[in-house]
Amino acid sequence: MGLETLFGQSYLTTRIDAVLNWARENSLFPMPFGTACCAIEFMGLVSAAFDLARFGAEVVRFSPRQSDLLMVMGTISYKQAPILKRIHEQMPEPKWVLCMGVCACSGGFYNNYCTVQGIDEIIPVDIYVAGCPPRPEGLLEAIMRLQKERVEKQSVLGSAG
Ligand code: SF4
């Protein structure tokens, strides 16, 4: 964005992509899909101590239709996989997926017949957060990276740049 002066008055010039993405990245609406202990760490993230509100993403929604950031936390069984896929499909574009913890990222130590070995077998993932569980600081870094590396590069024409 640039600040210009014309006939003694100031005005801003920008691109549609830049202004839309600025609004989007500072008003993410996360939807937590928590199935296990990682979800407890998410509660720390949105509490006063770590204060996710500083990054504009504190308005948690439990409806996929009102969310643009799906946060998957915990072990995902094959029985839950169609539910996760359906919820992701119900979210409007543009949307992003954050995969939290080793269980959601790769199955973790649940290497067995009933556990999905990484949610990217079911839905596309934008950012992975390692740990068992990841600390809230790790989640904050992941959200900031998502804002800068994904949301900010989104195009109004649909595909990420
Ligand atoms: S990664 Fe660790 S903390 Fe997170 S759901 Fe799996 S076992 Fe629980």
Image (cartoon, grey):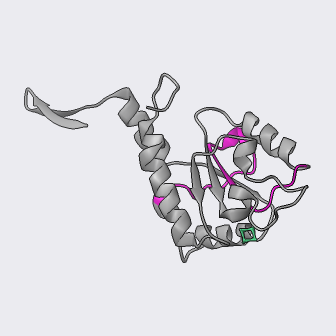
Residue at left offset 49%, top offset 42% = 24
Residue 72 on the magenta span: yes
Q: Is residue 17 left or right of residue 72?
A: left
Figure quadrant of residue 71 = bottom right
Q: Nearer the viewer, residue 13 or 124?
A: 124
Depth order, front residue of 130/147 = 130
Quadrant containing the N terminus in the rendered view: top left
Q: Farthest residue toward the left?
A: 8
Residue 50, above or below 130: below
Q: Position of residue 18 (x, y in %)?
A: 36, 35
Q: Residue furthest bottom?
A: 49
Q: Is 60 located above or below residue 16 in the figure?
A: below
Residue 51 at least partly seen: no
How many labels sit on residues? 0
156 lies above or below 89:
above
What span is in magenta? 55-78
Instruction: Using residue 79 as the reference point, say whether residue 92 is left or right of it.
Output: left
- In the rendered view of the protein, which quadrant contains the C terminus? top left
Residue drawn at the location 48% of the way across and 22% of the way down: 157
Magenta: predominant secondary structure element? loop
Residue 38 percent coordinates (x, y): 71, 68
Q: Specify whether 12 is left or right of 123.
A: left
Using the rendered image of the protein, determine whether residue 38 is visible from the camera's viewpoint: yes
